[in-house]
Image (cartoon, grey):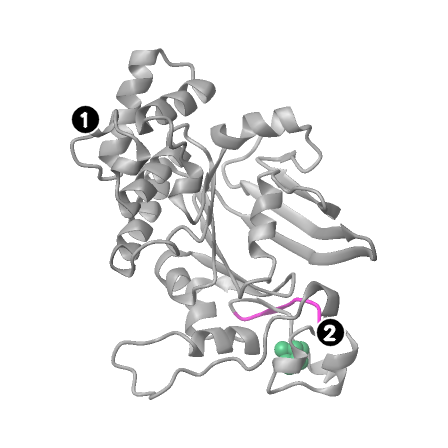
């Protein structure tokens, strides 16, 4: 494996393109995504359903299933190219080096095993620890994620936990083998609103304490604003804006990001109705030419319908929009 300097990115995605093979030929679902993730950084990937953000996370973990496939680009994890690794090697990397947290904790936990058995199995698969030491680590992790009476709860089954407590267990499971990257895909969407903030705070604290970088996939700009260091806004398989959270959330550039921000409910806001972005994310069979956002964009120009805007550096990040490419307007 390539030696990494402390400042090297933990993850580099280069020109990643994912398609689905169909009877009528390949359909592009993700097209030319590039980004780096620094050690310990939390990158939020945000966009509506169908933007390609979950597919990107799935490709990084090597879990993309046919008819989906990577058809261009490369993924480097700690300096090693991983998108071409055979499945057994990728399986070893998952869990040990790359942890996952999904929307519904019930799909991540085996209902037939106690949470302790699942934690101990993960710990012993990836770390060389005796059974007793692994059990102690499992109890310590349950305590760390806020499970009361962890010495007792370790021997209970997932159905004996509430939804929020189960997601705490999943966070423990994702981090107990000391991964350097965690992919969290809509980790709070299935939870009661009253406990979403607690789980996000816990995720942030656990990843900071254990030095893990995070890709946080969500459709919710509010979640991003609370949790992420940097944000990649995705639309129709492309990153249309990327930058530090205070810039993208506080002063967005791309018309789509502005639309997402205007649709967040605000306590004390004086707007009677939330502004919504008219129209819907295009289907894979029907992606418009040029800028895919042009049918919904209030600023669309002729060139937007003809040619794809490239990502350009702007103050505080990068944006793919002709409004920021003066020479072409
Ligand atoms: Fe709107 Fe054109 Fe910018 Fe696309 S490139 S977001 S259509 S102004």
Region rendered in magenta: 308-315
Residue 124 % position (x, y): 41, 18
* Residue 14 visible here: yes
Label 2 neighbourhood size at 10 Å, few (<14), some (14-19), many (20+)? some
SS of the residue under disc 2 = loop
Position of residue 259 relative to residue 237, above or below, is below
Q: Is residue 79 left or right of residue 153?
A: right
The residue under label 2 is: 288
Question: In the rendered view of the protein, which quadrant contains the C terminus?
Answer: bottom right
Residue at the location (52% across, 73% down)? 257
Whether the residue carrying mark 2 lies under 8 Å from ligand 1 is answered with: no
SS of the residue under disc 1 = helix
Question: In the rendered view of the protein, which quadrant contains the N terminus?
Answer: top right
Asked which quadrant contains residue 171, the reply is top left
Residue at the location (34% across, 48% down)? 204
| Residues at discs 1 and 2 in contact (Cβ within 8 Å) | no
The residue under label 1 is: 152
Q: How many marks?
A: 2
Magenta part mainly helix, strand or loop? loop
């Amino acid at each position: 494996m390539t030696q990494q300097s402390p400042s090297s990115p933990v993850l580099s995605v280069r020109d990643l393109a994912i398609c689905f093979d169909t009877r009528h030929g390949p359909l592009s679902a993700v097209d030319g995504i590039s980004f780096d993730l620094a050690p310990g950084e939390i990158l939020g990937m945000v966009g509506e359903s169908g933007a390609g953000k979950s597919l990107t996370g799935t490709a990084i973990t090597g879990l993309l299933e046919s008819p989906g496939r990577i058809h261009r680009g490369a993924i480097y994890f700690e300096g090693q190219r991983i998108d071409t690794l055979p499945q057994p090697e990728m399986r070893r990397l998952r869990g040990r080096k790359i942890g996952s947290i999904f929307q519904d904790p019930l799909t991540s936990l085996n209902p037939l095993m106690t949470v302790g058995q699942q934690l101990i199995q993960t710990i012993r698969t990836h770390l060389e620890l005796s059974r007793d030491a692994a059990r102690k680590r499992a109890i310590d992790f349950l305590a760390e994620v806020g499970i009361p009476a962890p010495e007792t709860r370790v021997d209970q089954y997932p159905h004996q936990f509430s939804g929020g407590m189960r997601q705490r267990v999943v966070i423990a499971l994702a981090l107990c083998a000391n991964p350097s990257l965690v992919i969290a895909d809509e980790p709070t969407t299935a939870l009661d609103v009253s406990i979403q903030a607690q789980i996000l705070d816990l995720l942030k604290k656990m990843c900071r304490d254990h030095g893990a970088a995070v890709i946080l996939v969500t459709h919710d700009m509010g979640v991003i604003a609370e949790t992420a260091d940097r944000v990649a806004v995705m639309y129709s398989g492309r990153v249309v804006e990327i930058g530090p959270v205070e810039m993208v959330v506080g002063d967005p550039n791309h018309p789509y990001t502005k639309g997402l921000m205007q649709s967040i409910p605000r306590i004390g806001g004086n707007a009677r109705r939330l502004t919504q972005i008219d129209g819907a994310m295009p289907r894979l069979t029907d992606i418009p030419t040029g800028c895919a956002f042009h049918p919904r964009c209030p600023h669309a120009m002729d060139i937007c319908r003809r040619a794809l805007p490239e990502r350009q550096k702007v103050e505080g990040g990068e944006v793919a929009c002709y409004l920021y490419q003066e020479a072409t307007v």
